[in-house]
Image: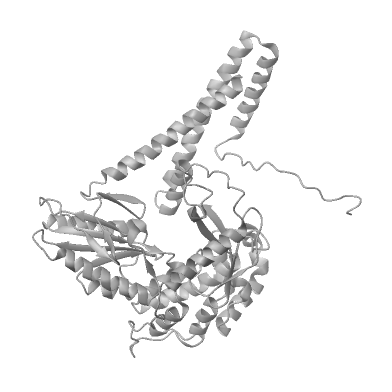
Amino acid sequence: MDLLCPLSTICRKNSSTAPWLSHVLHNNWRELRSAARKWKKSKLDIDLISYRTLLSKFSLDMTSAKTSFYKKNLETSAQDPRKLHNISSSLLNTPAPLSPSSLTTEDFATFYTEKIERICQTFTSPPTSSTSHSQHSTTPSLTQLSTVAAEEVLQIIRSCNPTTCPLDPIPSAMLQTISPDLLPFITTVINGSLTSGHVPTVFKKARVIPILKKPALDPSDISNYRPVSFLSFLSKILERVVCNQLSDYLMQNNLHDPNQSGFKSAHSTETALLAVTEKLHAARSAKLSSVLILLDLSAAFDTVNHKTLLSTLRSLGICGIAWEWFASYLDGRSYQVTWKGLTPAPRRLSTGVPQGSVLGPLLFSLYTHSLGKVISSHGFSYHCYADDTQLIFSFPPSDTTASARISACLVDISSWMTAHQLKLNPSKTELLVIPGDPSPAQDLAISLNNSMISPSATARNLGVTMDNQLSFSSHVTNVTRSYQAFALNITVSKLLANRNDLF
């Protein structure tokens, strides 16, 4: 075969058909190209007029088709915030620039590994075991993960988003299609893992792809890249089975943090923002001033200490084979960086919960559950979305002890973070002071870990720009500016396309 039909490499043009292009538009496009070729060949005025007429009609039809396509998508996704976010991102985000050739896979792997090591080295004392959750005798324990029926596994497979990872032997969409034929084997693997308390090693591997955080950032600076982790599709199916059982156990025994909106049914960034803004509006209506503090953590998911996490799970009543499964899930994890088609040797992970996983966010929320008691002990209210923590403190405008109380709370939070090996980042922690109407604005400067946190006029919270008057005028301005920039890009692209067609 190599002699008669040798393998050859060709460069395939990676272009996808626009979803709004109908069969009619395709035919119109062929007629337009034919008219353009005819005019270029004949140079007659009548052919030019014909070409321009077809071009004008095609542009109007294309704009109408795009408008109808996105209008229909927005209407059908009105109740799904994730789909709405994806649609708006596809409209507003510009493509990332080409990556420089100077960065290699080893550069990224070394950078990510050393970053976590540097953060962990800042914690001088070993992590403390979790003692915040005392298991009561009346609280039932989760000692064994229940086996699942084949029908439940099939339902989970079909309901999952078919994201394909480089570790998957076949595309996830194809696996979903042929899953009824493979169902007995997949169910056996999943139930075998649940009953033995062991997670297969192949399910504990991840591929990390560096993605530029923002298109305008310098692509030659390695710190401007965000590591996006991909896990195999079958490992996510196993995690979904366990996540469903763990969530049911936490819900039945009221062990969820009521102020945590991350990755919880009927909760989202919208519900978290509504909860925070309602508290701020209520305080302002009561003539109270408020402080909103947005805590920032450095690589929060990657520095979770496994011993502390397992101790927290045990204190929540998770023991026996169930506890052994989570211990196996955390132990022996590894990752490989994929960059420009190259993949270096795998690197071991001794800390952290896997990002991009199904269980990772839930385990992180359990890991930080006891932080709420520290915050509440100072009279603060709070709300969390995954690793984003929002502190709210309302006080009379005449209160002269507000700064001291805020500083004392932040000191205890910092101590808790250090004890749990989480790195609080004072330089990115934001402070917003909302004065009580009609009291004047207060200038509060807070000290945290030898750094000063000064109030700002605006702060970005879960994708929304909040201001100290709760008017959201800054957010509206930013969104309007983004849409104007998008419209300008479309206009320029259309003019360039028309120019290329004419000349």
Residue 91 to residue 277: above or below: above
Residue 484 to residue 261: above or below: above
Q: Nearer the viewer, residue 48 or 57?
A: 48
For residue 266, say whether it is visible: no
For this orientation, the residue located farthest to the right is 4
For residue 375, say whether it is visible: yes
Residue 78 to residue 37: above or below: below
Colour setup of the view: one colour
Q: Nearer the viewer, residue 261 or 305?
A: 305
Residue 266 to residue 363: above or below: above
For this orientation, the residue located farthest to the front is 450
Image position, residue 390 (x, y; %) = 29, 62
Residue at 52 percent of width and 71 percent of height: 239
Q: Quadrant of residue 413?
A: bottom left
Image position, residue 399 (x, y; %) = 10, 63
Residue at 10 percent of width and 50 percent of height: 438
Image position, residue 194 (x, y; %) = 55, 80
Q: Quadrant of the C terminus?
A: top right
Residue at 55 percent of width and 56 percent of height: 210
Residue at 59 percent of width and 30 percent of height: 25
Q: Is residue 378 left or right of residue 213?
A: left
Q: Quadrant of residue 432?
A: bottom left
